[in-house]
Image (cartoon, rainbow, N blue to C red):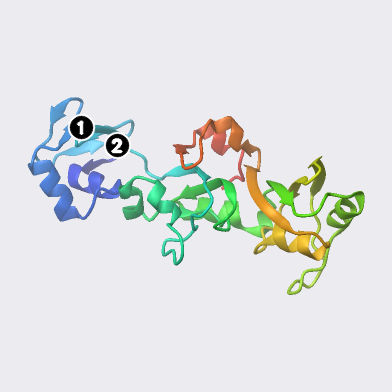
């Protein structure tokens, strides 16, 4: 891997403009291997590089692959309108790197949200052609019935869809609880399918994407983590 000047490295990691990154370096706020680096022209191999900026360590990452446990009342938008955006739950420099949600969850929906600054990865996980299964836990207003499950498995017609949409899996988990697996990813799909089947979605939680389960990540609401290569392998290949 070719070497890159320190100011370019900091800029690529989201620490600000080139001018600001040079100022950080010249002010002695950047260390590598415990040594202050005050020459922004110095080049480094980025493989395994660990930066210390304002006494906090940051591992160099060409791209970011994150999982966030989204709380309720956060919008999956870079320009939220009525609620805080999910980017406010991440370090500020991730915004500089143009990290964005992979797909969307409604503001009142909780659960796993993937986020990245890698375009091909975002496309692979969100493209309906990839048929990435997503697992939801839905709380219904009215009790779950065998007829409701049968309708969701067989397919229900939504207003703006040319053909009925069916759940890949639909199983009862309680009197008012359903586990639904979808792979289409349509707008408000779970809520609209339940409404079309004569019930109402009172609460919704996404518990897994592909083979990656939120519970395996050990996150609390509002927390995030970097995804390991092993965890990324459980998602759709890029």
Q: Can you give x and y, in whole percent of width and height, for residue 216 in the image?
A: 59, 30
Position of 70 with respect to 154 (left or right) is left
Q: Can you give x and y, in whole percent of width and height, for residue 226 in the image?
A: 45, 37
Q: In which quarter of the image is the N terminus?
A: top left
Position of 213 with respect to 40 (left or right) is right
Tell me which residue sits at (75%, 54%) in the image: 141
Q: Which of marks 1 and 2 is nearer the N terminus?
A: 2
- Which residue is disc 1 drawn over? 55
Tell me which residue sits at (79%, 62%) in the image: 165
- Secondary structure state at the residue bearing disc 2: loop
Q: Distance between the residues labelled 1 and 2?
A: 19 Å
Foreground of the two, 124 or 47: 124
**Does 37 appear above or below 11?**
above
Q: Which mark is residue 46?
A: 2
Position of 18 with respect to 213 (left or right) is left
Tell me which residue sits at (80%, 46%) in the image: 169
């Amino acid at each position: 891997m070719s070497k890159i000047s320190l100011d370019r490295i900091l800029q690529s990691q989201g620490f600000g403009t080139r001018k600001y990154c040079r100022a950080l370096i010249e002010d002695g706020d950047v260390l590598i291997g415990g040594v202050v680096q005050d020459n922004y022209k110095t080049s480094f191999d980025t493989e395994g590089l660990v930066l210390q900026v304002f006494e906090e360590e940051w591992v160099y990452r060409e791209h970011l692959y994150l999982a966030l446990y989204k709380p309720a009342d956060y919008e999956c938008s870079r320009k939220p309108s009525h609620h805080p955006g999910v980017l406010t739950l991440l370090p500020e420099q991730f915004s500089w790197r143009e990290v964005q949600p992979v797909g969307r969850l409604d503001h009142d929906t909780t659960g796993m949200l993937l986020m990245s600054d890698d375009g091909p990865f975002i496309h692979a996980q969100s493209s309906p052609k990839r048929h990435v299964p997503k697992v939801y836990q839905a709380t219904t207003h009215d009790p779950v019935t065998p007829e409701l499950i049968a309708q969701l498995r067989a397919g229900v017609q939504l207003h703006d869809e040319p053909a009925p949409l069916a759940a890949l899996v639909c199983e009862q988990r309680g009197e008012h609880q359903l586990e639904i697996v979808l792979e289409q990813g349509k707008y408000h799909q779970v809520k609209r399918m339940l409404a079309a089947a004569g019930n109402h979605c009172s609460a919704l939680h996404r518990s897994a994407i592909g083979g990656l389960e939120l519970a395996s990540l050990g996150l609390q609401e509002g927390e995030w983590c970097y995804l390991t290569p092993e965890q990324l392998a459980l998602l759709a290949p890029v």
